[in-house]
Image: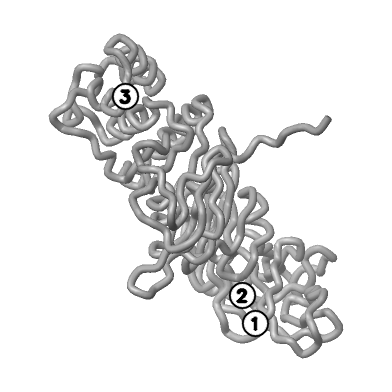
């Protein structure tokens, strides 16, 4: 007896969007399971929102197929209308109706007897802690409260899929983290498949079970947030999540020589130019006590001498920029808490080998 495999709640196959001869979404494919949050992450103009609109049915794809629970809902010939796709939508501007009460906003998309509508409205407003505003109007609410009403309205018809396009970008930074966490808990409880669009790496890391990193209409890397962050596909993927430092070197015998010692470059042919990319938090600092720098360690390699150019305290960490002796370039380092050395101070820097990425030029 063979078991049956549950199809993904949402599946996109080879989706393409072209406008005026320009390819905006270029042959992308991904799946989202029920109860899973997948984030389309990338810079503005990379095709994230266009992908969302094609799934919602408000844009027509140039090629490719969209499936919900294993059933085709759209290709270039067949198309289920947007209102029959059982897909919820949340946008950046919330789009609440100002002339309707909070209760009527939440109930707007519901098709059920009056008593059932009211019960569902009260259930959702209780979840988002807004029952006290059930008879109020949107203009009486704060931005965070309006966002929670928009979430309740989108969830009211029990959509199988929730599409969210930069839904938190209009919120005050002080409120954003708490509201994101509340929203995520409610979405998980409702067991919808969630596709979130954002250009903020921190938001994707905080909310997503899986990240699809987009660039110029393509998905360049996809996986769990930890894997996308720690095993980046290329240099721009590293840089999208944080500041970076870059060393250039040439490979000889699977080793790249740098002022910080040799780096392994397995599989890279001899005489290939490479870039060694590392984040500021993976630079180790030592004071110049004896003019020779610290003794090298196997994990950190050789120390290089730098002079503090500037230092700033950023709240949870300090950022220090060094002018390096070996070529006069600037190199950034971050350390936890407060550390603001004066400009001109000499220090020795080493790099964690296990946190470096080597990419052929």
Q: Residue at x 13, y 29 (%)?
A: 99
Looking at marks 3 and 1 on the same chain, the residue that comes earlier in the sequence is marked by: 3
Q: Is residue 85 above or below residue 250?
A: above
Residue 171: image quadrant is top left
Looking at the picture, how far across and down is residue 359, in whole percent?
Answer: 68, 75
Q: Nearer the viewer, residue 242 or 19?
A: 19
Q: Residue under circle 1?
A: 361
User: Viewer-nearest of labels 2 and 1?
Assistant: 1
User: Viewer-nearest of labels 3 and 1?
Assistant: 3
Residue 258: image quadrant is bottom right
Q: Residue under circle 3?
A: 110
Residue 308: image quadrant is bottom right
Q: Nearer the viewer, residue 243 or 311?
A: 243
Q: Quadrant of the N terminus?
A: top right
Looking at the picture, how far across and down is residue 172, in whole percent?
Answer: 32, 42
Looking at the picture, how far across and down is residue 165, in whole percent?
Answer: 38, 47
Q: Is residue 101 left or right of residue 275?
A: left
Residue extending farthest left: 99
Residue extending farthest top: 115
Label 3, label 1: how far apart the Cα atoms are: 55 Å
Q: Residue under circle 2?
A: 246
Q: Quadrant of the C terminus?
A: bottom right
The secondary element bearing badge 3 is classed as loop
**Colour mode of the rendering:** one colour
Q: Nearer the viewer, residue 82 or 134?
A: 82
Label 2, label 1: how far apart the Cα atoms are: 12 Å
């Amino acid at each position: 007896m063979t078991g049956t495999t549950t199809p993904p709640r949402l599946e996109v196959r080879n989706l393409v969007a072209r406008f005026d001869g320009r390819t905006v979404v270029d042959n992308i494919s991904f799946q989202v399971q029920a109860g899973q949050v997948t984030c389309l992450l990338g810079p503005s103009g990379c095709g994230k929102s266009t992908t969302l609109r094609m799934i919602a049915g408000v844009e027509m794809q140039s090629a490719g197929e969209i499936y919900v629970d294993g059933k085709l809902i759209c290709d270039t010939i067949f198309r289920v209308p947007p209102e029959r796709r059982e897909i919820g939508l949340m946008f950046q501007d919330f789009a609440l109706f100002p002339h309707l009460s909070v209760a009527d906003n939440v109930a707007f998309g519901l098709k059920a007897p009056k008593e059932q509508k009211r019960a569902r409205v009260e259930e959702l407003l209780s979840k988002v802690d807004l029952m006290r505003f059930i008879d109020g109007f949107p203009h009486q609410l704060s931005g965070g409260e309006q966002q929670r009403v928009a979430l309740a309205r989108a969830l009211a018809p029990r959509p199988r899929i929730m599409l969210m396009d930069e839904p938190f970008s209009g919120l005050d930074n002080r409120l954003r983290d708490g509201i994101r966490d509340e929203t995520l808990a409610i979405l998980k409880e409702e067991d919808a498949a969630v596709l979130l669009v954002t250009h903020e790496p921190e938001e994707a890391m905080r909310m997503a079970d899986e990240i699809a990193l987009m660039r110029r209409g393509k998905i360049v890397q996809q996986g769990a947030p930890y894997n996308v962050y720690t095993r980046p596909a290329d240099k721009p993927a590293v840089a999208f999540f944080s500041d970076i430092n870059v060393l250039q070197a040439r490979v000889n015998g699977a080793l790249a020589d740098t002022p910080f010692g040799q780096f392994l470059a397995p599989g890279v042919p001899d005489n290939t130019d490479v870039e060694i990319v590392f984040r500021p938090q993976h630079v180790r600092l030592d004071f110049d006590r004896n003019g020779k720098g610290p003794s090298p360690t196997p994990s950190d390699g050789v120390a290089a001498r730098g002079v503090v150019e500037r230092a700033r305290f950023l709240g949870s960490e300090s950022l220090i920029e060094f002018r390096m002796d070996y070529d006069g370039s600037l190199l950034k380092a971050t350390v936890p808490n407060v550390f603001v050395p004066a400009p001109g101070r000499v220090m020795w820097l080493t790099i964690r080998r296990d946190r470096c990425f080597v990419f052929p030029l």
